[in-house]
């Protein structure tokens, strides 16, 4: 897994903090809240601008960028309000920001490639610091901020993502059109329109990994426009 590095401006994190590996006990997942931004652009922004916040990693469907060194404390899940998690704080967590986009209805979504990269990165962090999947949290779980929005709006999607971190196969079956997740809707609509997916729209019975492959093939242009 290739990771690129662009060091954050020291004004955005505790640059003089030094953590030992055993100090790192949580990973907090965030979303950038932007529409179609890139990990690279975020890393570059935080390297120069001084918003006074930061994350260790930025992830999109193309790349993973390291912004703050893991042994330094980044500022991503602190709050002046209430904490809803008893232990997870900036000082013992690694912050990972996922780039997002808005779908046709204006809702934030993650690309499958972004989730693939995130899962690979998180599994590596879990191994390196012996972090159990229970300690991989949404920002929401720490402060109740609506972040990462796609995993707060759709808690089932978060549970499915956690299963990937555990190495469990996702056996979810999308039975009907209403069950088809946002990231696959364009593909399923196209395949149905072209007659590649048979049967009516009522009962599709598409298994999760099969659906992922259809979407990947569609992006590769295998099903035309
Ligand atoms: Zn967040």
Image: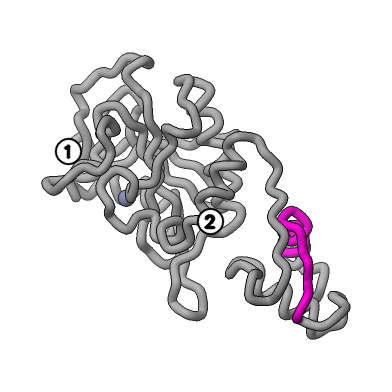
**Crowding near pointer 2: few (<14 within 10 Å), some, many (20+)?**
few
Q: In the picture provided, is 18 more to the left or to the right than 210?
A: left
* Residue 192 covered by magenta stretch: no
> Residue 187: x and y, percent?
71, 72
Q: Which residue is mark 1?
A: 11
Who's the residue at 57% across and 37% down the image?
165
What span is colored magenta in the figure? 202-217
Q: Residue at x 46, y 25 (%)?
A: 131
Question: What is the distance, in whole Å, between disc 1 and disc 2 at their CAs?
Answer: 37 Å
Please say whether residue 47 is visible from this viewpoint: no
Does residue 133 sit above or below 187 in this rendering? above
Q: Main secondary structure of the magenta part?
A: helix
Query: Of callouts 1 and 2, which one flags the residue occurring earlier in the amino acid sequence?
Result: 1
**Percent position of residue 49, x then y:** 22, 49
* Vertical comparison of 155 with 190: above or below: above
In the picture as drawn, the residue positioned furthest to the left comes out as: 80
Q: Quadrant of residue 56?
A: top left
The quadrant in which the C terminus is found is bottom right
Q: Which residue is mark 2?
A: 156
Labelled disc at residue 223: none
Left or right of 92 on screen, residue 219:
right
Q: Is residue 207 left or right of residue 18?
A: right
């Amino acid at each position: 897994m290739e990771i690129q590095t662009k060091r954050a401006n020291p004004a955005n994190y505790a640059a003089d903090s030094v953590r030992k590996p055993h100090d790192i006990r949580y990973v907090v997942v965030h979303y950038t809240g932007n529409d179609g931004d890139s990990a690279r652009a975020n890393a570059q922004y935080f390297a120069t601008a001084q918003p006074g916040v930061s994350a260790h990693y930025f992830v999109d469907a193309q790349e993973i960028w390291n912004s703050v060194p893991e042994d330094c404390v980044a500022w991503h899940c602190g709050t002046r309000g209430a904490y809803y998690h008893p232990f997870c704080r900036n000082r013992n967590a690694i912050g990972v920001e996922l780039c997002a986009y808005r779908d046709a209805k204006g809702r934030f979504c993650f690309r499958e490639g972004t989730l693939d990269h995130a899962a690979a990165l998180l599994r590596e962090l879990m191994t390196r610091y012996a972090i159990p999947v229970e300690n991989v949290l949404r920002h929401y779980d720490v402060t109740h901020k609506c972040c990462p929005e796609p995993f707060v709006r759709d808690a089932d999607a978060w549970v499915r993502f956690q299963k990937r971190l555990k190495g469990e196969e996702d056996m979810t079956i999308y039975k009907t059109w209403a069950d088809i997740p946002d990231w696959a809707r364009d593909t399923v609509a196209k395949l149905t329109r072209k007659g590649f997916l048979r049967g009516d729209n009522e009962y599709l019975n598409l298994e999760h990994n099969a659906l992922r492959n259809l979407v990947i093939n569609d992006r590769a242009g295998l099903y035309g426009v």
